[in-house]
Image (cartoon, rainbow, N blue to C red):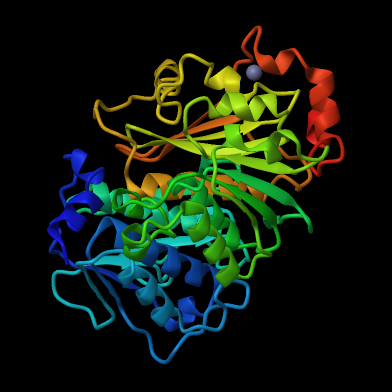
Amino acid sequence: MSASFEAKFEDRASRYDTRKLDPKRRINICTSRVALLTYPGQVQFLVAANLLARTHANVNLQPVDGSVPIDPRLPFAGKDIFDHALQDMRAVRERHQFTSSGPQAGDLLFNVDPKSSGYVIHGDGWNSWIGLGPSPLRAENETNPFGPALAVILAVAQVYLGDGNQPYVPIEANAFDWTLGFTSEKVLPTLPVGTKIWFNGLGSVGTATLYFLSLFTRRAFTTLVDADMVKVENISRSPLFTAQHASAHTPKVDVAAQFMADAGFPAPAVHKAMLDELKEWMNRDTGTPDLVVSAANERNVQYWTEVGHPPLQIYATTGKTFQVTLLRHIPVKEACSLCLFPLGEQVNPQTCAMDEEAASLGVVLGEEPVDPALPFLSFLAGMMSASEIGKVSLQGYPFTRNRVYVALNPTFRCVHSNIRKLEDCLCQRDTNKHSLAIEGSKFAGLSWIY
Ligand SMILES: [Zn+2]
């Protein structure tokens, strides 16, 4: 046990002085056996355990009667869900109280049983709900992790921002078109067989994207690109990083590759490198990959991405004032990533660019002069990216404009806008070459529909 581990672990989050919840107060994740035997119930439980272990060191998983195996549609199927969740949680920190015992007076309840009374966190299909139970959402138990995951992440953000006495503001939202209110959309997220995805960047948002992707598909063929090793400061923002990874200086790509092996993905191609030094990017075959998750934030990465004539890009960034921005670039048709983060203005591309736009759209932002650093922001960014990846092959895609801005403080809201194409940008000089480069990729059709 080391004091420096704890200090580094909390390094980024401690720059926010907004946290009011007593660190000694126990958060009790509770549910029922009936709820935990469903796919959405398991997604809620697992995401809550993983994320709360990163925001809070005192978390209990209240047992249900009998053992509950992980659903066959989820990674790690068949393992006892309590054993699995606790093992994951205990790997996160050196000093913690992560337990599985009965309720105690003074617990802050994190209740994911939709049928119970009191404040309830419930997602099903694309829909998410937080409020006084029982939940008004019909339990369809769809194989869709995104409504359940969104509900949990929004509730964790509220726990983090509150003092634990009035923890929940009611929310009705959906992860289909990222609006407040429920959607009637029933189509399930899916990914065509053989889809090839490049992950440029396996930091907090890249690994979170992979984690949420794994909840509905493990059949993507992936290429992982990142040059960094896990540091203690990174652990709290990634669903995959552990204390052991930080002490062993494990490369982030290796953490991601090991997770994929354990979760049942085909073996990825792994590059411990930055994109600009990777000949495999510039020299890759026409029509590959099908999709790029641009979650890297090193200098000029957008330039090196765009000169390589990328296919569809989907990713999300976290901002310094409790904000997440989901971004999409359909090649040739839409503004590219350089239109958004022009060369010479890339001091910290993942944190900038949205504030002015948000202000013009009437979103009031706070003034915290700190890094984008909170665990629930990178989880939200990864979840939104994975959700979009699950929609790209659905009829009628895209369902939103190419920039969806989400603010969490003081309460959840979404603003949709289109990224402006910059005059003179790289993306407008070479459209024929770009069209040829993406021809044959699975989602190239999106570029030709006007
Ligand atoms: Zn451009």
Looking at the image, which residue is at 52% across and 53% down? 253
Question: Where in the image, quadrant-wise, is ligand 1 located?
Answer: top right
Question: Which residue extends farthest bottom?
Answer: 66
Image coordinates of residue 248 in percent, x first then y, are 36, 61
Question: Would residue 356 be seen by someone viewing this image from the given angle?
Answer: yes
Describe residue 412's horizontal placement relative to residue 385 as left or right.
left
Image coordinates of residue 323 in percent, x first then y, are 39, 35
Question: Would residue 450 be seen by someone viewing this image from the given angle?
Answer: no
Looking at the image, which residue is at 53% across and 65% down? 258
Describe residue 83's horizontal placement relative to residue 264 as left or right.
left
Q: Quadrant of the C terminus?
A: top right
Occupied quadrant, residue 334: top right
Looking at the image, which residue is at 46% across and 21% down? 346
Which residue occupies the foreground of this view, 327 or 265? 265
Occupied quadrant, residue 426: top right
Which residue occupies the foreground of this view, 438 or 125? 438
Image coordinates of residue 368 in percent, x first then y, are 24, 29
Image coordinates of residue 444 in percent, x first then y, are 81, 36
